[in-house]
Image (cartoon, grey):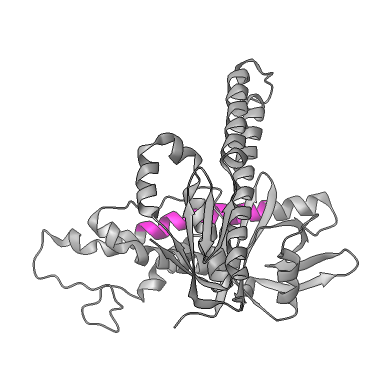
Amino acid sequence: MEKSTLKLTRKIQLVVDLPTQEERKEALDKLYQWQNRCFRAANLIVSHLYVQEMIKEFFYLSEGIKYKLADEKKDEDGILQRSRINTTYRVVSDRFKGEVPTNILSNLNRALISSFNKNRPEYWRGERSLKNFRRDMAFPFSLEGISGLSYNEEKKVFCFRLFQIPFRTYLGTDYTDKPQLLQRVVQGEIKLCTSHIKLKDGKIFWLPVFEIEKEKQSLKPEVIAEASLSLEYPIVVKTGKAKLSIGTREEFLHRRLAIQAACKRARVGATYSRSGKGRKRKTKAVTKFCNTERNYVHHRIHVYSRRLINFCIKHQAGTLILLNQQDKIGIAKEEEFVLRNWSYYDLMTKIKYKAEKAGIELIID
C-alpha cells in the first residue's frame, strides 16, 4: 500500500544562543569534536560490518567449523556474544564513551547498518567498494536530543536545545517553506524525524527531516501527461491538446556556458593573483564562479520541475510519463559536452520528488 506521508529535508543555519564569545567558541569546539568522533566511528562501523559479513571466507583453512552471525545465547551455532546490531554499537560506544552523546552513535550505527544491508549483494559480488567517510561529514541525532523547540516572539526566531546546547535559527529573508514547517512542528501538526548537523567554514547547519502528508490534488489517473527532456528545450510536456515548452537553450545552456567561460578566465588569471593566504586566496575568483554556476543550475532546475508539476495539476493529470529517456541517457554518455551541461540526473531527481509530493504517478520510459 502506498504511503500517505512524505519526508522532506531542509537546510537551516543555526547560531549558538549564548551571551559571550568564549561560551560560543566552546560550544562550537564541542560540535567539531562530535563531528570528528562520528567520522572515526563511521569508518569503524563499516569495517566491522564488512568483516562480519565476510567472516565465513576466513574459515577456508579449517573444516567442521560452525558459524552464524547471531547471539550464542539464542542460537547454538552463533559466534557473537550479543545481537549483531549491538556489536558495532558497543565497539564505538566503548571507544568514544564520554566524548560524544550516545544518541548520536546509536543513530549513526542504525543508519550505517541499514545502508550496508541495502548494498550487501554488490559488496558480495565485488561490484561496490565500502563507503569511506570524510572528516566534514554530517552527524545524525534523533528527536530525543532536541528539547524546548519553540518560537521566540521577541527575537522572531525558533529556539531549541540540542544536548543542552542552546541554538536559535537564522533564516534571514527566507521565502521558502522552512518557517511554516517549523511552526507546524511546534504546533504538533507534523513530525520531526532523525536529522543531521553539518559544520562548514565555522557555520552550523541543521538538516531537519519533516514527515508530512502528501498534497491532495483533484487528479485523474486516466489523464496522462507526456514529457520529454532534451538539451534544446529542457522540458516539453503535453496532455490532450495542451502543450508547454519549459525553458529554452538560450536561457539555460548559453548562460551556463558564459559562466563557465568566466570561470576559465579566472582560472588562467589565478596564477598572477596576489597571494598571502595560500591557494585559497589565489583561487577566490574561481571558487566564486564555480558556486555561481552551481547555484544557477540548481535554481533553474527547481523552476523547470515546478512548472512541469504545476502544468500536470492544472490539467488534472494523475500520471506523468517521461518519454525515451534511456536513449537520451546513452547519447549523453557518448557526448562529453551533453553529459557535462545537461544536468539530467538533477532534473530527474527533482521531478520525481515533486511528483511524489503532489501525488502524481511518475513513469520513466
Count the numbered circles shown: 0
Q: Position of residue 333 (x, y in %)?
A: 37, 42
The front one of 259 and 160 is 259
Q: Is residue 148 left or right of residue 83?
A: right
- Identify the residue shown where x is 23% and y is 57%: 125
Q: Position of residue 248 (x, y in %)?
A: 58, 44
Q: Is residue 293 left or right of residue 76?
A: right
Q: Position of residue 84 (x, y in %)?
A: 35, 72
Residue 241 located within the stretch drawn in magenta: no
Taking the view exactly as shown, the residue that stands out farthest to the right is: 154
Taking the view exactly as shown, the residue that stands out farthest to the front is: 241
Splitting the image into 4 quarters, where does residue 189 fall? bottom right
- Identify the residue shown where x is 64% and y is 15%: 272
Position of the N terminus by quadrant: bottom left
Highlighted range, magenta = 29-47
Splitting the image into 4 quarters, where does residue 281 fall? top right
Position of the C terminus by quadrant: bottom left
- Identify the residue shown where x is 29% and y is 57%: 123
Q: Is residue 215 visible?
A: yes
Q: Is residue 6 left or right of residue 69?
A: right
Taking the view exactly as shown, the residue that stands out farthest to the left is: 63
Q: Position of residue 228 (x, y in %)?
A: 47, 54
Q: Is residue 194 visible?
A: no
- Identify the residue shown where x is 37% and y is 43%: 331
Q: Main SS of the magenta segment?
A: helix
Residue 37 located within the stretch drawn in magenta: yes
114 is higher (above) or lower (below) than 274: below
The front one of 301 and 66 is 301
